[in-house]
Amino acid sequence: MPVRAAVAGASGYAGGEVLRLLLGHPEVEIGAVTAHGNAGQRLGVVQPHLVPLAGRELVATTAEALAGHDVIFLALPHGQSAAVAEALGPEALVVDCGADFRLADAAAWEQFYGSPHAGTWPYGLPELPGAREALRGARRIAVPGCYPTAVSLALFPAYAAGLAEPEAVVVAASGASGAGKAPKPHLLGSEVMGSMSPYGVGGVHRHTPEMAQNLGAVAGEPVTVSFTPTLAPMSRGILATCSAKARPGVDAADVRAAYEKALGDEPFVRLLPEGQWPSTAAVYGSNIALVQVALDTAAGRIVVVSAIDNLTKGTAGGAVQSMNIALGLDEATGLSTIGVAP
Amino acid sequence: MPVRAAVAGASGYAGGEVLRLLLGHPEVEIGAVTAHGNAGQRLGVVQPHLVPLAGRELVATTAEALAGHDVIFLALPHGQSAAVAEALGPEALVVDCGADFRLADAAAWEQFYGSPHAGTWPYGLPELPGAREALRGARRIAVPGCYPTAVSLALFPAYAAGLAEPEAVVVAASGASGAGKAPKPHLLGSEVMGSMSPYGVGGVHRHTPEMAQNLGAVAGEPVTVSFTPTLAPMSRGILATCSAKARPGVDAADVRAAYEKALGDEPFVRLLPEGQWPSTAAVYGSNIALVQVALDTAAGRIVVVSAIDNLTKGTAGGAVQSMNIALGLDEATGLSTIGVAP
Amino acid sequence: MPVRAAVAGASGYAGGEVLRLLLGHPEVEIGAVTAHGNAGQRLGVVQPHLVPLAGRELVATTAEALAGHDVIFLALPHGQSAAVAEALGPEALVVDCGADFRLADAAAWEQFYGSPHAGTWPYGLPELPGAREALRGARRIAVPGCYPTAVSLALFPAYAAGLAEPEAVVVAASGASGAGKAPKPHLLGSEVMGSMSPYGVGGVHRHTPEMAQNLGAVAGEPVTVSFTPTLAPMSRGILATCSAKARPGVDAADVRAAYEKALGDEPFVRLLPEGQWPSTAAVYGSNIALVQVALDTAAGRIVVVSAIDNLTKGTAGGAVQSMNIALGLDEATGLSTIGVAP
Amino acid sequence: MPVRAAVAGASGYAGGEVLRLLLGHPEVEIGAVTAHGNAGQRLGVVQPHLVPLAGRELVATTAEALAGHDVIFLALPHGQSAAVAEALGPEALVVDCGADFRLADAAAWEQFYGSPHAGTWPYGLPELPGAREALRGARRIAVPGCYPTAVSLALFPAYAAGLAEPEAVVVAASGASGAGKAPKPHLLGSEVMGSMSPYGVGGVHRHTPEMAQNLGAVAGEPVTVSFTPTLAPMSRGILATCSAKARPGVDAADVRAAYEKALGDEPFVRLLPEGQWPSTAAVYGSNIALVQVALDTAAGRIVVVSAIDNLTKGTAGGAVQSMNIALGLDEATGLSTIGVAP
């Protein structure tokens, strides 16, 4: 009997990507697809690339529309998930692609999101130590932010092995789909093409405490993250350049060994052969994270670069991967490590 | 027992796309992957998006390397397929992504390609009248050019229904991957980004006689094609804007009906609902052609726009689709109508 | 004494480009810069590339704000120019970058724009036969549409020389800035990048009657234009591929001669040496139109490709060029034929 | 009497940009334009955007061709400038856009460039303390690297004021023109578009010692730079995200004051109003550097972002600016702070 899945927020980029992946998932049957402003539209108008669903009608996002499904993916604006989830009952698996339940620290939540903390759900980044265990059988999953996915996968091996000082510096470039589908002047094609620009500089981006939470848990001590996100002229992809001072005595072999140990068996992270570096093109549409690491001996820093597709491994693919674990399916079901390139 | 497939020219864009699709084909096992200049390299270096094949070694393109496979895909420079195919014997299915065997008219071949005509193989555009029959059981397949695929699918319904005068005008925009992976100054990112430019203007592009051949066969009379290809600042995709004078008395309902009749049942062509127009973004990585048609009554022309992914439906996807037919598999096996967007 | 110029609609793309050019115009002093929704903002926030004007405040677009200038550039949404112009008095030179006064045919205006015809002003495409004379001393100028600029420059020589049948076919690709700065979902960077898409297909685009008007006047008989605009993944630029059947007996030398005669002395049109084709990259930020022509003898068509920067020669540069003529200045003052490339 | 200037390497990106700027320089007359592989070509074929020079012939790069000019710009591959410069005599002003004479430390040169050190010339970044004095009357100028320009302008104010620890971390994104015009597979449009990728990671990029040299001189103590360059899908532009730990007790007002003091009077650096961040789009084709700074109190770091056009302020514009100083002209002659946007 197939798993019946609903997608709330199906007209946006995250919701569309969830649908794209579920269409290729052999155990899932797509039920309700809901939207807010686009309710009543055919999906073919809003998501013309999802040809097999072109005739489906988007219905309004209500508890009634979402009830009766085994899994409900929420791809809603921040702050809307709690009310919807509450109405859904404890048996259904609710996978929240929003931020509402990612942070354990209520104060950090309130500082960065400016609203009361709704709670904390099992965190859907299976590669982090202990995460798979928490996801098995879970009925609520908080899908990580796209930047924290790229950055945590890049840096946790160094912290797990005790190789790095607890002060990370991260500069990441994201494709414009990370900013969503709501039209704003600075996201127009004319503005984005041919331009790199930073935003949320100086420690104010909302994904900062999420990175600190993940890395701090692995390190066993607080880790600060100086995080600068930049908007790149591409639709998809995150390239995260991450570094931290190497602890005294750490050499290149230590670093390589730590990364091989932490990432070597992961189905959706690939530590590249030495000398080869990741690109976002290579992960376009795929659920894999490509990672490479170097030790800059002159500067005394471990430098790690990771590339993900922000909508796949960074959102919808991570969501499906965690769903698979929660439901007891093979973790890789319906997910691909093959990108679409060039 | 799986179909064992080899890919010659696996380091290029066409060969890489064949591999990407074969990786998702449930009946195919990938055998030899061969190259010329890149022989000896790991595939992971040359095609980093094909993660499951990263460790595979590219071997030199020789008859020996390609022998012993059920299917051999040739993704070689024009003029190299004949010699390779001859050495492979008549039992193996040889699918040529190059131009060598596309044209029936030896004079046209020699005029446009400047070399002796090698022959004519069954033409791998199943949607054309009679094409599926010719492909069933075939052991040699000539995969159409990317532009002729987009243009023939756009215009053949009008000619099949006798609605259009035999003088077509086509302007098509292609992503840069259509020009291949051999580095040339005008294909550099710095040159391509932010720029539209034409090439092969005035009836000299090699795909022109192929379009004329396809449309003429459907029309039952010679069709001239004024074809202007342009290079667009994107990696993949072809948008073909095609038009021809409407025959006297043709109205919009005639046109719609002809297109619905010709395309309505095709698994890999979608005539869009009226008012919706195709984009290359919607077919990125997918094997579908999106088509829309309008009658411009003031100008007296039928205007058709089609969008394909030049590497998928325009090359490797078309090749796999035709292979499926030749081998007696379901035509859609291993092929998707779902694009990766945005 | 400098010419004092105001710009209404200075926060949009057309208005910003007018300001960019006026900043380099030795005879002009920039006066009021006005806006609607952005009134009260510093120009540096809205147009950060116009560094010398960064501290200027955008004021509300009112007759009072615009009064007292020698020249007023209107870069307003269609339909708003007439009321503003009326309030400005007959002595000021009003240069309208909008469509309101471009068409002579009131019926065509009403059919395509759906509102009453406001009148007809001298048409600001100096290269057309007779246009310069009409612009000298004019106090009202209708700046042509961007597409009609590219298409008229490409095709008028053929019609002026009587070489082409009166049925033109045009497919043009435009950068996204042509669609303006008002945010709409389909203009988001995520949607535009990597994608070509058509719009206004089938003879419904508003620039169609303007092209027909220009070409018909030159030809001395009505000319129909089958026009398909497409949106290309770039910020600026128009590449127009235009063709028409050659009249019987026309040969390549006739065509070349006609184009050399018509364009050879133009300061802002360059007929390229034979064999070289235009690209939008080469005209980025410049006021030049690059043109090349070929005769496709097999299809019997004259094929012309032109490239312009839609914001410069296609809007603001054309506006300044016409202003120069109207004011009796050297036509090239403050305008450049040098693009910014790569 | 105009300054007569020759450009060696005029077919490349740097040489083309030098020519673009010299065309707008009121005191300069363009003499010889030389090339290597493209010698004998018309400039219009190789640099089609430089319309006024389209008919000029590229001659071979020889001492004879370059002799007899007041200024010679060298835009040659690394390692070729010394021999050419020697043949030119001491009176001519030689402005080297290459790396050969940038580094004072012969050991660093040999480590990073792998060839004997040719010497050190006055360094063409006038904004650095003491640089203008060294440039006045100079007859040899070493134009800085593009990355060092962006990074030095971003960080020197913090070091000049003693606000930052001597360990800088820099991640910069560059447009593809920074990699030059020699065709290589990884620079193809198909590879670059839609992709961010790092290169030269781990302290091995050749611009690293140049940054350390500049910042160390200002700081009065050695400064290490952890530098990661990335290739962005755009033709032009560098966005440099730079940070360093704030010294104890430093607050936001100290930082702001230091930047206003260091940059406030510079004609070609603009410290943006608080809250506004630079983008490469805003500096496209302009000679300005846009800079903004923030203090991340949680991470304890000063974060600075700068944007330049790598070909203008980062190469040719910086070269002309330094030439102006050397020749005793107004520093801003022929240079613009106005970008071409969108």
Image (spheres, coloured by chain):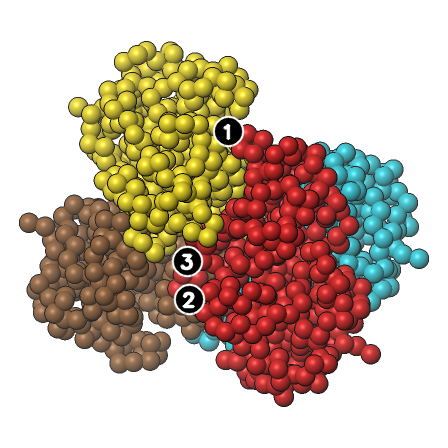
Chain colours: A red, B cyan, C brown, D yellow
Q: Judging from the image, what secondary structure is the residue with disc 1 in?
A: loop
Element marked by disc 3? helix
Query: Real-space Cα distance between discs 2 and 1?
Result: 39 Å
Name the quarter where the N terminus of chain B is drawn: bottom right
Please tell me how crowded label 1 is: few (under 14), some (14-19), or many (20+) other residues with Cα within 10 Å: some
Neighbor class of circle 3 (other Cα within 10 Å; few <14, some 14-19, many 20+) is many
Q: Amino acid at mark 3?
A: Ser
In the picture of the structure, the residue carrying the numbered disc 2 is A184
For disc 1, the marked residue is: D206
Give yes or no for contact between labels 3 and 1 (Cβ–Cβ under 8 Å). no
Camera-near label (3 vs 1) is 1
The chain under label 3 reads: A
Q: Are marks 3 and 2 in contact (CB under 8 Å)?
A: no
Q: Residues within 10 Å of mark 2 (few under 14, many from 20)?
A: some
B279 shown above or below A280: below
The image position of residue B215, as x and y in percent, is 64, 62
Of labels 3 and 2, earlier in sequence is 2
Residue C236 location, quadrant = bottom left
- Is residue A17 visible from the viewing direction of this image? no
Relative placement, left or right, of B201 versus B218 is left
What's under tag 1, amino acid-wise?
A: Arg
Question: Residue C239, image x and y in percent?
Answer: 43, 54
Residue identified by numbered label 3: A190
Left or right side of A260 for D268: left
Are marks 2 and 1 in one subunit?
A: no
Which residue occupies 32% across, 11% down?
Answer: D89
Quadrant for residue A76, please give it: bottom right
